[in-house]
Amino acid sequence: MNIKRSCCLVILLGSFNASADLRIEAADQSGQQVVFSSNDQFVRMDVQREQKYALIDLQRQAFMLVSPQQREVLVLDHSNTDGRAGAALEIKLNPAGDGPEIAGYPTRKYLLLANNKKCAVIYGSKQAARHPGMQKLFAALAQLQQRISDMMSGLAPSVDVCARAKSHTMQAFSTTGSPLRIDSADGKTQTRISRIDSHAQIPATAWKIPPAFKVTHMKDQMKQIELQKQQMLQQMQRQMPDMQKMIEQLKRDGKMPQQAVEQLRKMKELFKQREPK
């Protein structure tokens, strides 16, 4: 299962706490339809042309990506990045006037800044926020996106501040209302809700995962990725003396570009930083 793609698909997941089922229709940045289905205990997200869906069990706080064709379930565990996610973010929400009507609701425009860098434009609606369970929806959304952000920080510690700030587009609910549309800093629409049905009837089978499906935990995949990174680093370190001899010979023969010498120096510095203390 492609982790990066999957991460992009779950950005609008959340939870509701209403007696009736809810169904929200939206579109992502590529124009694909995204359908969110919810009852009191579960939230499910289906994406057009995708052969998998996302499911949240609210009572167990379990976040899962389900691939029926592969008969697999990927559990997004809570991640401890040991501070690798970077320095604390200073988040600002600046009102920017009225927005367009979206899905039949009036909106207000807000600029989201992280450490004074413009990261997103949110079109929120207080009227849409009146649907039962909406606040709980976006609280769970923020938790999910934070979990993804922590996971990605574990893979790449120098994650951009805007990538780390994504969860705040959901945490801003109390200020913006329901975020019916989210644009990137350059004005490209990332998500747009088109319809909210608070009287949907969702079949019970939508919330059940077949017991025969193989369950894999993200924390185990992360450990495997880290192990592979360490093995690759060790292999490169073993090859470094031979590389150094070859490069010295090329330098003596006048065939070694200065740019390549500089790249080698940076690689050696990186190896030293990665060496166990």
Image (cartoon, helix red, strand yellow):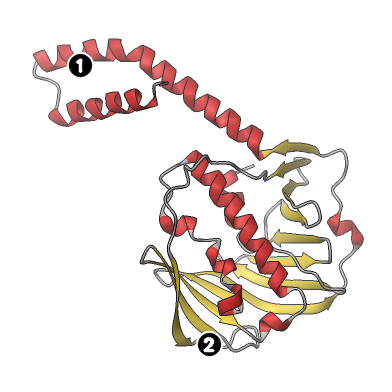
Percent x, y of residue 165: 49, 60
Question: Where does the image place residue 49, in percent across and percent down from the top left?
Answer: 67, 57
Instruction: Find numbered disc 1 in the image and state the secondary structure of the residue it sits on.
Output: helix
- Amino acid type, label 2: Pro
Determine the residue positioned at 87% across, 45% down.
210
- Pinpoint residue 147: horizontal percent, then vertical percent: 61, 50
Most foreground residue, 58 or 216: 58
The residue pinned by badge 2 equals 100
- Residue 10 can be seen, yes or no: no
**Is 115 drawn above or below residue 24 in the view shown?**
above
Between 78 and 238, the one nearer to me in the picture: 78
Task: Please tell me whether residue 275 is drawn above or below residue 139 in the rendered image.
Answer: above
For the point 87% across and 73% down, the residue is 19
Residue 46: tell me if it is visible.
Answer: yes
Residue positioned most to the right: 204
Quote the CA–CA distance across marks 2 and 1: 61 Å
Which quadrant, please, contains the N terminus?
Answer: top right
- What is the number of the mark on residue 137? none
Q: Residues within 10 Å of mark 2 (few under 14, many from 20)?
A: some
> Given contact means CB atoms under 8 Å apart, are the residues at marks 2 and 1 in contact?
no
Q: Is residue 209 left or right of residue 180?
A: right
Q: Amino acid at mark 1?
A: Ile
Q: How many residues crowd mark 1 within 10 Å: few (<14), some (14–19), many (20+)?
A: some
- Residue sitting at 44 percent across and 59 percent down? 89
Looking at the figure, which quarter contains the C terminus? top left
Which residue carries the number 1 mark?
247
Corner quadrant of residue 205:
bottom right
Choose the circle earlier in sequence order: 2 or 1.
2
Q: Is residue 148 left or right of residue 214?
A: left
Classify mark 2: helix, strand or loop: loop
The x and y percentages for residue 247 are 20, 16
